[in-house]
Amino acid sequence: GARAAGGLAGAAAGLLALAGALGGAEASALLLVEKSAPERAVSGKELPVTVTIYNVGEDAAIDVELGMNAKGGNLPLEHVRGEPTRKFSEIAPGGSASHTEVVRVGKDGVLTLEPAQLTYNRGDGGRTGAQSTQPTAVLVVTGSVALIESLLKVGSVLTLGLVTNLSQWWNLGFTSLLVGGTYFGLKTHGSIQKAREDHARAASLKALGLDKPGQGQKKKK
């Protein structure tokens, strides 16, 4: 975002310097506009869309009128807050201004936002228009998918990167169940074996008449 805007600003400034050197063009404002949004969103949740305006010209831009143009291709968008249009009385040379509109996406899919539009006075008496860059497509997922992704992120942190997808969660769960079942089985087997040994020992003592208190001492006498 910032790197791309910086590249656009540098290129535009270079073109202006070249035009001035060749033809002695009058100083005027030149606005470059960037529109941006998060790369992922959740259907039914809020999505901020921001437009940033850079004046890379040599004069102030006057009476700047911005239209956010909140359209999302085949996905429905609902305005939440932040004005869909905005006016700036002046943007100085080398200065910038930004505005954010928050929308809500109606369903999951790939959201393609339309470029923003604006008009302004260049400072030399003329009025002109500009169009923003087109934001990268936004992947919109359902709430359940977002929850699974969040759980996988937590699992990745807790397992130090061992679990990063559902298949690995399944394998880890199966392994845990197998290890836990084996441990429980061994404990149970050990308990049964001990009970059998105690029962056999008691039966032997009973057969020898040593199961009653004092019987062992009488026999020794």
Image (spheres, rainbow, N blue to C red):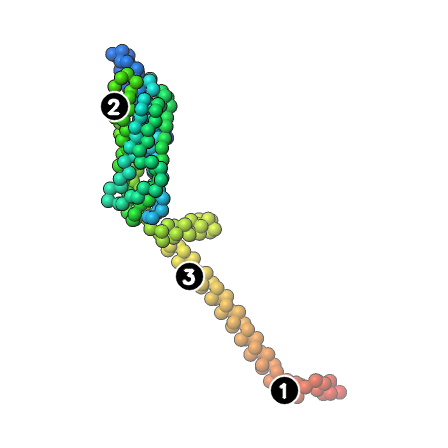
**Mark earlier in primary sequence (1, 2):** 2
Is residue 157 rendered to the left or right of residue 28?
Answer: right
Name the mark nearer the viewer: 1 or 2. 2
Is residue 132 at all visible to an observer of this figure? no
The secondary element bearing badge 1 is classed as: helix
The secondary element bearing badge 2 is classed as: strand
Q: Are marks 2 and 3 in contact (CB under 8 Å)?
A: no
Judging by the rendered image, the residue that carries numbered circle 1 is: 206
The x, y position of residue 38, in whole percent, is 35, 40
Q: CA distance from mark 1 to mark 2?
A: 110 Å
Judging by the rendered image, the residue that carries numbered circle 3 is: 174
Task: State the image quarter where residue 67 is shown.
Answer: top left
The x, y position of residue 165, in whole percent, is 38, 52
Which residue is drawn at the image coordinates 34% and 24% (left, top)? 89
Q: Vertical placement of 29 versus 133: above or below?
A: above
Q: Nearer the viewer, residue 158 or 105?
A: 105
Q: Amino acid at mark 3?
A: Phe
Q: Amino acid at mark 1?
A: Lys
Judging by the rendered image, the residue that carries numbered circle 2 is: 128
Q: Vertical placement of 177 versus 108: above or below?
A: below
Q: Residues within 10 Å of mark 1 (few under 14, many from 20)?
A: few
Q: CA distance from mark 3 to mark 1?
A: 47 Å
**Mark earlier in primary sequence (3, 1):** 3
The x, y position of residue 128, in whole percent, is 25, 23
Q: Amino acid at mark 2?
A: Thr
Q: CA distance from mark 2 to mark 3?
A: 65 Å
The x, y position of residue 200, in whole percent, is 58, 82
Q: Nearer the viewer, residue 93 or 157?
A: 93
